[in-house]
């Protein structure tokens, strides 16, 4: 099918579907941005003892699982369902298939919080099965795209395995010392390294005047390949041994990511808030990786939030905001939204890391960090939810 016929067929299918189901990013970016503050609010209520959790997860396990495999998973789905058709040249998922995937994702969230009546095995099958199907979709598009995006398909499949393992270790009492949670985080770090390594320099160069674009390092250099490979090795080492050697390789990966962030010359793009927010989000990645080596074994639970509540969450916000604007044709006046959201979420993550120190009481610090973090996602919803439910406009007309 040539491009003209494919575009005509796509527009015909879009016309039959509700606006919010006309592209993968629309329902899943909404779901992600809404679920994060909902889950955080529920977590804060659990800490206060005002609500009870009827699940095979204990409260801490439920919190980490729903942040990683719930909110992050929805954003990842929206991005992949939007990006993968560009690999293969095939039509994207529209209408009914999107609604089915969204319903499946929502069912997993519901059963994870109420699995006392269903049991852990059905919850594991529903939750991890969702990501296995997503991996199959990504793999199919990669196959038709002659291998483009194959690494993303593999990482999505590994994400599904980590999701299922997290359920079973929680339900059956298997001792994995948190390796399944680390695996989920490590996979997301790899995705930031791979996807961020392509998007950030591309968006940076496109936002610069033509006469200075060549001064910004192009994507996909040999150095980027080294960064990705070292990150993969460091992630695997950290999953297996979150001490000694694992921490050493994480530190090396952190230094390489810091060098990469500097090579992108973010100071040249300070005039474009929607792009600088991507740079700020990415900067939290090397800071988090280096933090593990500085803090040692004892403080990993706290410093981990610099990766999860910080780098991963901020990158999700920045990418969702940028794609929401570009895919719906909105005017650049909205570009301050992602920067404000990223800053609030960053402040919340940093406050969470230092909660419990001499200057920040633990409970008050957790509460304020959670509120700041929720406020950041609230900013995204205020700015970008209308874009996701309204029709695309001509660029510059809104």
Image (spheres, rainbow, N blue to C red):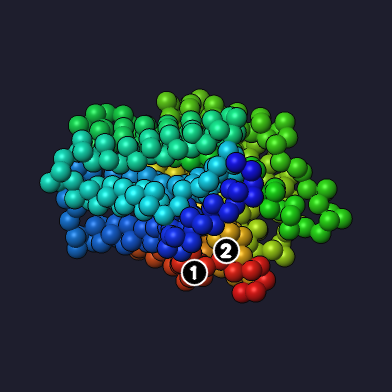
**355 or 92: which is nearer to us?**
92
Q: Residue at x 65, y 36 (%)?
A: 256
Q: Is residue 68 left or right of residue 52?
A: right
Rendering coords of residue 264 (x, y %)? 72, 47
Label 2 neighbour load within 10 Å: few <14, some 14-19, many 20+: some
Whole-number angstrom distance, CA of label 1 to CA of label 2: 9 Å
Q: Which residue is mark 2?
A: 328
- In the picture as drawn, the residue positioned furthest to the right comes out as 211
**391 or 39: which is nearer to us?**
391
Q: Name above or below for residue 71 compared with residue 244.
A: below
Label 1 neighbour load within 10 Å: few <14, some 14-19, many 20+: few
Q: Name above or below for residue 241 compared with residue 298.
A: above
Res 373 → quadrant:
bottom left
Rendering coords of residue 350 (x, y %)? 49, 56
Q: Is residue 284 left or right of residue 297?
A: right
Rendering coords of residue 304 (x, y %)? 44, 44
Q: Secondary structure at mark 1?
A: loop
Indicate which disc residue 390 carries. Answer: 1
Res 290 → quadrant:
top right
Q: Residue at x 72, y 31 (%)?
A: 222
Labels 1 and 2 touching (C-beta < 8 A): yes
**395 or 347: which is nearer to us?**
395
Indicate which disc residue 5 carries. Answer: none
Q: Earlier in the sequence, mark 1 or mark 2?
A: 2
Q: Residue at x 46, y 48 (%)?
A: 93
Q: Residue at x 65, y 64 (%)?
A: 273
- In the picture as drawn, the residue positioned furthest to the bottom comes out as 398
């Amino acid at each position: 099918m040539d491009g003209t016929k494919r575009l005509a067929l796509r527009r015909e299918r879009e016309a039959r579907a509700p606006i919010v189901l006309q592209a993968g990013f629309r329902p899943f970016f909404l779901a992600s941005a809404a679920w994060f503050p909902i889950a955080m609010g529920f977590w804060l209520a659990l800490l206060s003892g005002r609500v009870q959790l009827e699940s095979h997860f204990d409260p801490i396990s439920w919190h980490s699982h729903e942040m990683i495999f719930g909110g992050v998973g929805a954003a990842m789905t929206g991005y992949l369902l939007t990006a993968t058709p560009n690999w293969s040249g095939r039509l994207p998922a529209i209408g009914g298939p999107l609604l089915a995937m969204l319903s499946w994702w929502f069912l997993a969230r519901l059963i994870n919080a109420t699995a006392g009546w269903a049991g852990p095995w059905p919850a594991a099958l529903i939750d991890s099965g969702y990501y296995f199907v997503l991996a199959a979709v990504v793999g199919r598009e990669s196959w038709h795209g002659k291998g483009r995006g194959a690494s993303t398909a593999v990482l999505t499949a590994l994400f599904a395995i980590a999701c299922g393992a997290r359920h079973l270790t929680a339900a059956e009492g298997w001792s994995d010392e948190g390796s399944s949670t680390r695996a989920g985080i490590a996979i997301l770090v790899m995705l930031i390294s791979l996807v961020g390594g392509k998007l950030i320099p591309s968006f940076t160069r496109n936002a610069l005047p033509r006469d200075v674009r060549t001064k910004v390092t192009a994507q996909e250099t040999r150095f980027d390949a080294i960064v990705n490979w070292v990150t993969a090795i460091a992630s695997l080492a950290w999953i297996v041994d979150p001490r000694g050697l694992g921490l050493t390789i994480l530190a090396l990966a952190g230094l390489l990511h810091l060098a990469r962030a500097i090579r992108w010359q973010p100071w040249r793009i300070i005039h474009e808030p929607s792009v600088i927010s991507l740079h700020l989000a990415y900067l939290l990645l090397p800071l988090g990786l280096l933090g593990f080596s500085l803090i040692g074994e004892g403080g990993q639970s706290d410093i981990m939030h610099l990766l999860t509540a910080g780098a991963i969450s901020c990158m999700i916000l920045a990418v969702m905001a940028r794609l929401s604007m570009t895919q719906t044709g909105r005017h650049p006046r909205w570009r301050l939204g992602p920067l404000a959201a990223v800053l609030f979420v960053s402040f919340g993550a940093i406050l969470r890391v230092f909660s419990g120190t001499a200057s920040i009481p633990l409970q008050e610090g957790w509460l304020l960090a959670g509120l700041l973090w929720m406020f950041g996602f609230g900013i995204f919803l205020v700015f970008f939810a209308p874009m996701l439910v309204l029709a695309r406009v001509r660029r510059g007309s809104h």
